[in-house]
Image (cartoon, helix red, strand yellow):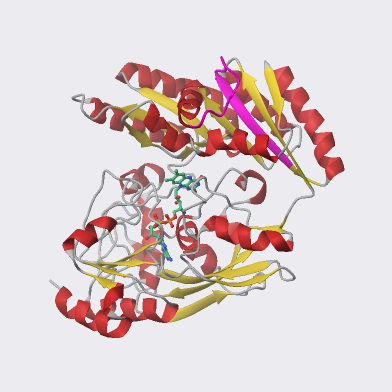
Amino acid sequence: MADIDALARRLRAELGSEQVVTDRHELRTYECDGLAHYKVIPALVALPHSAAQVAAVVKACAAAGVPFVARGSGTGLSGGALPHAEGVLIVTAQMRRILDIAPADERAVVEPGVINLQVTKAATPHGYYYAPDPSSQQICSIGGNVAENSGGAHCLKYGFTTNHVTGLQIVAPDGELVRLGGRALDPPGYDLIGAFVGSEGTLGVATEVTVRLTRLPESVRTLLAAFPSIDAAGAATSAIIAAGVVPAAIEMMDALAIEAAEAAVACGYPPGAAAVLIVELDGPVAEVEAQFEQVTALCTRAGAFELRIAADETERALFWRGRKSAFAAVGRISPDYIVQDGVIPRTALPEVLHRISELAASHGVRVANVFHAGDGNLHPLVLFDARVEGEAERAETVSGAIIDLCIEYGGSITGEHGVGMDKAKYMPRMYGQDDLDTMQLVRCAFDPGHLANPGKVFPTPRLCGERPGGDLAARFPGVEVF
Ligand SMILES: Cc1cc2nc3c(=O)[nH]c(=O)nc-3n(C[C@H](O)[C@H](O)[C@H](O)COP(=O)(O)OP(=O)(O)OC[C@H]3O[C@@H](n4cnc5c(N)ncnc54)[C@H](O)[C@@H]3O)c2cc1C
């Protein structure tokens, strides 16, 4: 077992003692991320101020053979930033400088602890914003967004984080500072930025991120449409996309999610709706106006019984407040809940939602649905009361069965919240052994010592020195199998 006291002494000397936490009570602050039912107290927390300090921490970990886990704001919902009991948690909360806003290049360069919304706030006076907008954007960090390849309501039109990162500085697991890409597009060679984005802290720590800035649209129109059934709202979603319109966002909430949002933020959604859609269009005025007419007609044709058009920015914010607060709002109607995250083809929405409600009924739990309908990214919230015997287990069963449904319909076990700790066990349901072995090769190329966020993403953690399942050596002659 590594000598944590010696590591703490080294880090205090290199970083300063106030940036190294070893007090057990203070360490508890970091024991979980947004998935609060997993808790682990780290051996040590480091609070670096700069890329050089991150490199010093990682180098010290490599020398001592101590695992490390990066943490941004700790809002992750898959246990990705769950600490390692014998490891170091590297918290980027003190690396919050916006290093450059370059409108002419349409780029911003930021430290990893910068909060997502701060990038937009800094870019807006220049006529730009940062498009990926997770609902947690008021608190989550850009480093966390990069690691999770985070999405948001507007990713339907603008793409996920991976489409907005052009450059990275990372600290590799041996402590070396490495630059990948930059402000320019399409560097030659392998797409290592593509590999790093979404790697959930298993390939190193991002210490600087260069992102694209997107021009603020000339016009934005937002519509709230209330439907008598989920089927009707699903049909409207498919009809809008089939008509060739790509809204900036199409979000859906069902009756239970609406009830929770009303209880929490009084967003004033139409009473009696079995589902609401928020549809937002943005772009040049003429295009938005023409498409808006099309969208309202399609919603009416699909059975919408009430259409509200945001008259101004205040009303638009109110429509969005209900949606963006929905996860937390569910706490108003249930003491406990699991936030699930899966993807299905958009056209399967009505069928899968029916099967989810059958699953819920047969297990005696309730499921609220709030999701990015436009790209088929479901967020079923499985409600339960942990004080009632057996309810937590039933909720867990329903939550796992929903993931099976996503796979059955040709989707994915996660849309945007990542695999982390929580979903590592589902990876073999989606990938064969060959796929997992190949991913392991990528991981080991960056992290042969297996120190970067070990135990996450992969179902069967193994050291890079161990031979993975299957006969990789035979299939890739000449390749050194880690
Ligand atoms: C209410 C709520 C709403 C949410 N809505 C959305 C949503 O709409 N879309 C969405 O995609 N997600 C959403 N999330 C999930 C979460 O906010 C995102 O995954 C976010 O990107 C996590 O950022 P963070 O800074 O909190 O990261 P953390 O939770 O601290 O870490 C997440 C992962 O990133 C790694 N990591 C953190 N920083 C670095 C770094 N600098 N270098 C390398 N790895 C790093 C960690 O090791 C961990 O694996 C939501 C969460 C909540 C609580």
In the picture, which quadrant includes the N terminus? bottom left
Horizontally, residue 102 falls left or right of residue 433, namely right
Image quarter where ligand 1 lies: bottom left
* 277 w.r.t. 354: above or below: below
- Residue at (74% x, 59% y) in the render: 127
Q: Which residue range is magenta in the image?
A: 265-281
Residue 304 seen anywhere in this rendered image of the structure = no
Position in image of residue 160 (x %, y %): 58, 52
Task: Say which of 39 and 462 sits in front.
Answer: 39
Position in image of residue 219 (x %, y %): 78, 45
- Check the image and name the residue furthest to the right: 286
For residue 235, which quarter of the picture? top right
Position in image of residue 130 (x %, y %): 63, 57
In the picture, which quadrant includes the C terminus? bottom left
- Residue at (34% x, 46% y) in the render: 423
Horizontally, residue 347 falls left or right of residue 402, namely right
Q: Is residue 24 magenta?
A: no
Residue 98 seen anywhere in this rendered image of the structure = yes
